[in-house]
Image: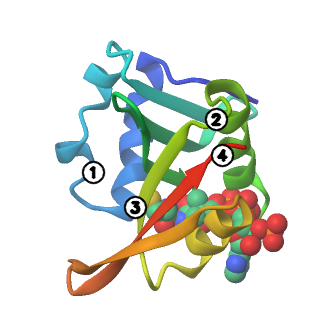
Amino acid sequence: MIRNARIEDIEIINDLGNLVSNTFSKSYNVASYLENNKYIILVYLEENIVKGFILVYKNIDYYELEMIVVDINSRSRGIGTKLLKYFEDNYLQKNDVIYLEVAVNNEKALKLYKKFGYEIINIRKKYYQGIDANIMKKVIK
Ligand SMILES: CC(C)(COP(=O)(O)OP(=O)(O)OC[C@H]1O[C@@H](n2cnc3c(N)ncnc32)[C@H](O)[C@@H]1OP(=O)(O)O)[C@@H](O)C(=O)NCCC(=O)NCCS
């Protein structure tokens, strides 16, 4: 199941986030985001255990997909797809714009985003410790 993140999920969200960036729990204050309606954090659970999350920031006139992470042992089983679809279906409307950044060598994430219709609009040179980042955009139809 997918639901909004709660206080009891903070630790696992930080653990999952730290898999992607070891500064996640320092850079992202998940506890404060839970009380801030500009942030959307959704968690995917199996047997009551959080297996993945998506973190989105709602800017004035666009959304930023900050992070999507699935537990290493649960990847490639459709969880990332479900999280992204749930977010789009429940939070976005026609003409909404969403941006994200992803390392050019993150093939799995790139495939996921392309599958959802995100397009590369720019490249940020050497953004991730020497690796370029794709800036991607989607306009909801
Ligand atoms: C990116 C990530 C969230 C995807 O989650 P996931 O649950 O593994 O993704 P899904 O199973 O829904 O697969 C989504 C798409 O990714 C691609 N994909 C999945 N597994 C793949 C694999 N082993 N090799 C290549 N592509 C793969 C496929 O295109 C797939 O779509 P399809 O099954 O319809 O063909 C997950 O791999 C992850 O947590 N990665 C580390 C964190 C990260 O890099 N996040 C993105 C930047 S913030």
Mark-to-mark CA distance, 3 and 1: 8 Å
Give whichever of discs 3 and 4 has the lower sequence position.
3
Residue 137 position (above or below residue 90): below
Q: Amino acid at mark 4?
A: Leu
Q: Which residue is identified by label 4?
A: 84
Give whichever of discs 4 and 1 has the lower sequence position.
1
Mark-to-mark CA distance, 3 and 4: 19 Å
Is the Cβ of the residue at disc 4 closer than 8 Å to that at disc 2? yes
In depth, the one of 55 and 135 nearer the eye is: 135
Task: Give left or right: position of 23 versus 9.
Answer: left
Q: Residues within 10 Å of mark 1 (few under 14, many from 20)?
A: some
Answer with the quarter of the image where residue 32 lies: top left
Residue at disc 1, CB closer than 8 Å to ligand 1: no
Q: Is any atom of residue 63 visible in this view? A: yes
Is the Cβ of the residue at disc 3 closer than 8 Å to that at disc 2? no
Give whichever of discs 3 and 2 has the lower sequence position.
3
In depth, the one of 2 and 97 nearer the eye is: 97
The quadrant of the image that shows the C terminus is top right
Dot 1 lies on which element? helix
Q: Name the mark on residue 87.
A: 2
Residue 24 position (above or below residue 36): below
Dot 2 lies on which element? helix
Q: Residues within 10 Å of mark 2 (few under 14, many from 20)?
A: some
Total residue callouts: 4
Give whichever of discs 1 and 2 has the lower sequence position.
1
Task: Give left or right: position of 135 versus 138.
Answer: left
Q: Amino acid at mark 3?
A: Leu
Q: Name the mark on residue 19.
A: 3
Q: Amino acid at mark 1?
A: Phe
Dot 4 lies on which element? helix
Give whichever of discs 3 and 1 has the lower sequence position.
3
